[in-house]
Image (spheres, helix red, strand yellow):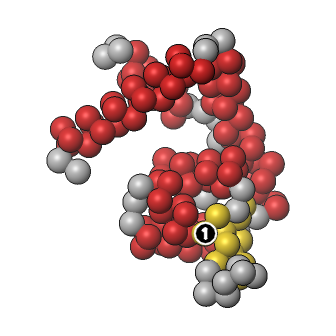
Amino acid sequence: MLLLMPRLVGRAKRLPVPAALRGLDLAPRHLALLAHLQYEGPLTVSQLAERLEVAHTTVSLMVGDLSRLGVLTRKEDDADRRRRIVAIAPDYAAPITEWLSGSAAAWTEVLAALTPAERATIVATMRAYEAALDAHSGT
């Protein structure tokens, strides 16, 4: 694993960025936010913060940046007018799908061959690894 993880991370970083997204200066944190919106659909800033496990203000800043670039839209929640629903703008839906699809297809293929218990073990292991990284980095 010690030799494999750097290769996997390096490979993920080399995923080709679609032309429509190249000039936007997107960082890995943006990719995580966009992945949640892509696979879960529109969410509130609070829901995004919870899923990304970061502060509400951090997500608000990212959403503001991406909204100004036209990548995201924010609209009033009909059920609670104080909340804003964040979604991927229609013009960027296809490029974002293209960007995320290689990784998603690979994970789908690999995980499909496993039993539900084996998939749960993989997810639990990845979460434990993330927690251990946090503990060792002092965050």
Rendering quarter of residue 63:
bottom right
| Residue 26 in view | no
Q: Residue at x 48, y 29 (%)?
A: 123
How many numbered callouts? 1
Report the amino acid beneath label 1.
Thr
At horizontal 78% and vertical 53% (from top left) the residue drawn is 93
Quadrant location of residue 90?
bottom right
Can you say whether 44 is above or below 137 in the image? below
48 or 72: nearer the viewer: 48
Circle 1 residue: 44
Establish if 136 lies above or below 64.
Answer: above
Residue 101, x across and y down, in percent: 71, 35
Q: Secondary structure at mark 1?
A: strand
Q: For mark 1, does the 10 Å Cα neighbourhood hold few (<14), some (14 to 19), or many (20 or more) residues?
A: many
Residue at (54, 61) in percent of width and height: 48
Horizontal relation, residue 90 to residue 96: left or right: right
Q: Is residue 43 left or right of residue 133?
A: right
Image coords of residue 68 (percent x, y): 63, 74
Measured as percent of width and height from the top left, residue 71 is found at 69, 63
Left or right position of 6 against 120: left
Q: Quadrant of residue 6?
A: top left
The x and y percentages for residue 107 are 62, 25
Of the 4 image quadrants, the one containing the N terminus is: top left
